[in-house]
Structures are given as structure tokens and as C-alpha cells.
Amino acid sequence: MGKRNHNQFIKRQKELERQRKATEKMARRQSKNARNETVEGSVGAESAPAEAEA
């Protein structure tokens, strides 16, 4: 009977680890998208005045 509880504990630990990795991966993807949007936004803002001056 103790074996069943230990197996449930291991299963729960694996589940928490998968959830933690998924959260980290989602955060990395969101930060990558945020960086790309800010770079595109700043490049677009800088090129617009240059075109107006020319």
C-alpha cells in the first residue's frame, strides 16, 4: 500500500516539472516576441522621420 502513495508522489513530481518547463518555455517565447516587436517598432519610427526629411 505504501508503494502506491510513493508512485503517486513521483507522478505528481513529474507533472509539476512538466508544468514548470512549459511555463519557462512560454515565458521565453513571449519575451522573444516582445523583443522583436520593440525592435520593429523602433526601427519603423526612426525610418519615418528620415523619409520625411528627404
Image (cartoon, rainbow, N blue to C red):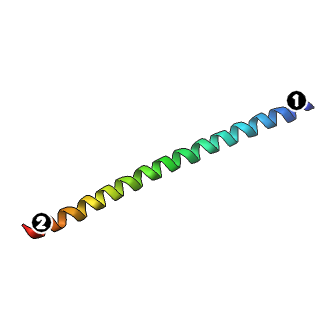
Between circles 2 and 1, the one closer to the viewer is 2
Callout 1 secondary element: helix
Look at mark 2 in the image and give the residue it sits on: 51
In the image: residue 19, left or right of residue 4: left
In the image: residue 10, left or right of residue 38: right
Indicate the quadrant containing the C terminus: top left, top right, bottom left or bottom right.
bottom left
Callout 2 secondary element: helix
Q: Earlier in the sequence, mark 2 or mark 1?
A: 1
Is residue 21 depicted above or below 40 in this figure? above
Q: In which quarter of the image is residue 14?
A: top right
The residue carrying pointer 1 sits among few (fewer than 14), some (14 to 19) or many (20 or more) residues within 10 Å by Cα, namely few
Determine which of the numbered discs, if any, sits on residue 24 in the image: none
Q: Which residue is drawn at 59% across and 41% down?
A: 21
Q: Which residue is drawn at 41% across and 56% down?
A: 34
Residue type (three-letter) at the residue carrying disc 2: Glu
Nearer to the camera, 40 or 54 = 54
Look at mark 1 in the image and give the residue it sits on: 3
Residue type (three-letter) at the residue carrying disc 1: Lys
Indicate the quadrant containing the N terminus: top left, top right, bottom left or bottom right.
top right
Nearer to the camera, 13 or 34 = 34
Q: In which quarter of the image is residue 43?
A: bottom left
Q: Residue at x 41, y 49 (%)?
A: 32
In the image: residue 18, left or right of residue 32: right
Q: Quadrant of residue 46?
A: bottom left
Residue located farthest toward the right when viewing the structure as drawn = 1
Q: Residue at x 28, y 61 (%)?
A: 42
Assess whether mark 1 and mark 2 are in contact (beta carbons under 8 angstroms).
no
Place of residue 7 in the rendered image (x, y in percent of width and height, measured from the top left) = 81, 32
In the image: residue 53, left or right of residue 8: left
Place of residue 22 in the rendered image (x, y in percent of width and height, measured from the top left) = 57, 44
